C-alpha cells in the first residue's frame, strides 16, 4: 500500500493535505511532514497543508491558505471520520488517501492506510518515507519526532513498541536533532496553565470506582487566563494517579457553545462510551463534543459504570 500511495502522489500535480479539527501536534506534524517531504521529492508540485491552526503550535510550523484547486489529490492525516476533517471534503477531490492510526470509522473512498497499532500518524509516515522514494531532511525528521513523542505522551503508552524506539533511534542517528529544542516547541507553557493544572489536581472529583473528572467552565478559563484549547489538552498530565483509573476533563468552549470531553484510561477501554455519545477515539484515549453539561455528565455516568464492571472483573 505504501507504494500505491507513492504512485498516487506522483500522479497528481496539486495535492492538499488536511487533518482533524481541534489540531494537536500529531495531526499538525504529520500533515506538515507529508507536505514538506512531497515538496522535497517533487519541487514542481503544488502542495498545501490546510486547516485551522492554533497559537499554541505556531512554533512548530506554518500552514497554507486553501486555494481553488481542480483535479487535486487529498491526503487526510490522523483522522478516522468524515465529520472531523478540517477544511476539506473528499467529494471535492479527484482522489483521497487516508493515513491514520485511529480505529476505522468512515471510509473516505480511496486508499486507506490505517495502522492502529502505531503510536502516531507520524510514525506511519516515518515508515512510508523509509519504504518509498519519498525524501526526508532534518526539518521533516524533527516534525515526525515531535508528532510521535506528543501522541505517545513521551512513550508512556503501550503503542510505543520496540519498532517505535528503533525507528526513532535511526532517525535521531541520521538527522542529529536537538531534543531540548524540540521539547521547548512542544512543552513550553505559561505559568497560568500550570496554575490551572494545580486547580484541577485540587478539585478533581474522584468516585469510588476510580473515575476522576473535572468541569472546566468558561469562567474558570477566564479566571486563569488560559485558552479553552490549552485547558482541554491538560488531560494528558493526569496519568498514573493511584486512585484514578479513568479520568476526564469537561471543558466549556463558549465560542462554539459546546463542551469538549476528553477521556483517558489506564483500565477499561473507553472508546465505546465516547462513540455512544457521538465521539470516538482510541481504546485508551477518546473524546466527544456535547452541547450541554447534562450530556457530559451522562458520559461520566457511563464511564463510572464501565469502571464498576472492570473493577469487579479484575478483583
Ligand atoms: P482529546 O482528548 O480531545 O485530545 O481526544 C482524544 C482522541 O479522541 C482524539 O485523538 C480523537 O481520536 C478522539 N476524539 C476526540 N473528540 C472526538 C469527537 N468529537 N469525535 C470523534 N473522536 C473524537
Image (spheres, rainbow, N blue to C red):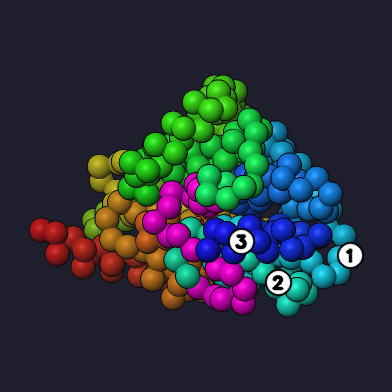
Circle 1 SS class: loop
Position in image of residue 143 (x %, y %): 61, 38
The reply to whether the residue tagged 3 has its Cβ within 8 angstroms of ligand 1 is no
* On screen, residue 9 above or below 125: below
User: Which residue appears farthest toward the right when viewing the image?
Assistant: 68
Q: Which of the numbered marks, if any, corresponds to residue 95?
A: 2
Q: Which of the numbered marks, if any, corresponds to residue 5?
A: 3
Circle 3 SS class: helix
Foreground mark, 1 or 2, reads: 2
- Residue 69 location, quadrant: bottom right
Mark yes or no: residue 85 visible. Answer: no
Give the magenta-colored segment's residue range.
105-128
Residue closer to the observer: 60 or 8:
8
Residue for point 37% across, 49% down: 159
The reply to whether the residue tagged 2 has its Cβ within 8 angstroms of ligand 1 is no
Q: Which of the numbered marks, if any, corresponds to residue 68?
A: 1
Q: Quadrant of the C terminus?
A: bottom left
10 Å crowding of disc 1: few (<14), some (14-19), many (20+): few
Residue for point 56% across, 32% down: 187
Mark 2–mark 3 CB contact (< 8 Å): no
Residue closer to the observer: 290 or 42:
42
Q: Is residue 11 left or right of residue 165?
A: right
As measured in the structure, the alpha-carbon distance from the residue carrying label 1 to the one carrying label 2 is 16 Å
Mark 1–mark 3 CB contact (< 8 Å): no
- Residue 221 location, quadrant: top right
Position in image of residue 88 (x %, y %): 74, 67
Residue for point 21% across, 63% down: 310
Circle 2 SS class: strand
Of mark 2 and mark 3, the one earlier in the sequence is: 3
Residue for point 61% across, 61% down: 5
Position in image of residue 261 (x %, y %): 50, 60
Foreground mark, 1 or 3, reads: 3
Amino acid at each position: 500500500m505504501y507504494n500505491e500511495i507513492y504512485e498516487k502522489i506522483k500522479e497528481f500535480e496539486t495535492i492538499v493535505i488536511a487533518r482533524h479539527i481541534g489540531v494537536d501536534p500529531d495531526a499538525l506534524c504529520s500533515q506538515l511532514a507529508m507536505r514538506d517531504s512531497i515538496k522535497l521529492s517533487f519541487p514542481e508540485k503544488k502542495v498545501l497543508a490546510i486547516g485551522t491552526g492554533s497559537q499554541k503550535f505556531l512554533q512548530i510550523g506554518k500552514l497554507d491558505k486553501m486555494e481553488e484547486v481542480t483535479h487535486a489529490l487529498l491526503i487526510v492525516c490522523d483522522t478516522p471520520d468524515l465529520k472531523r476533517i478540517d477544511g476539506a471534503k473528499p467529494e471535492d477531490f479527484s482522489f483521497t488517501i487516508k493515513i491514520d492510526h485511529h480505529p476505522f470509522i468512515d471510509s473516505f473512498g480511496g486508499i486507506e492506510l490505517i495502522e492502529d497499532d502505531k503510536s502516531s500518524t507520524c510514525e506511519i509516515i516515518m515508515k512510508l518515507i523509509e519504504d518509498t522514494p519519498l525524501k526526508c531532511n532534518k526539518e521533516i525528521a524533527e516534525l515526525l519526532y515531535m508528532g510521535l513523542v506528543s501522541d505517545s505522551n513521551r512513550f508512556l503508552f503501550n503503542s510505543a513498541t520496540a519498532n517505535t524506539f528503533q525507528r526513532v533511534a535511526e532517525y535521531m542517528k541520521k538527522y542529529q536533532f536537538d531534543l531540548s529544542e524540540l521539547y521547548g516547541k512542544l512543552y513550553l507553557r505559561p505559568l497560568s496553565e500550570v496554575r490551572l493544572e494545580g486547580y484541577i489536581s485540587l478539585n478533581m472529583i474522584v468516585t469510588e470506582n476510580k473515575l476522576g473528572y473535572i468541569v472546566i467552565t468558561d469562567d474558570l478559563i477566564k479566571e486563569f487566563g488560559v485558552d479553552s484549547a490549552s485547558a482541554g489538552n491538560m488531560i494528558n498530565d493526569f496519568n498514573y494517579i493511584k486512585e484514578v483509573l479513568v479520568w476526564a476533563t469537561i471543558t466549556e468552549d463558549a465560542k462554539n457553545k459546546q463542551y469538549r470531553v476528553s477521556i483517558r484510561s489506564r483500565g477499561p477501554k473507553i472508546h465505546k462510551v465516547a462513540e455512544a455519545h457521538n465521539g470516538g477515539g482510541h481504546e485508551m484515549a477518546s473524546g466527544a463534543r456535547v452541547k450541554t453539561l447534562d450530556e457530559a455528565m451522562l458520559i461520566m455516568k457511563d464511564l463510572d459504570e464501565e469502571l464498576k464492571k472492570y473493577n469487579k472483573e479484575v478483583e
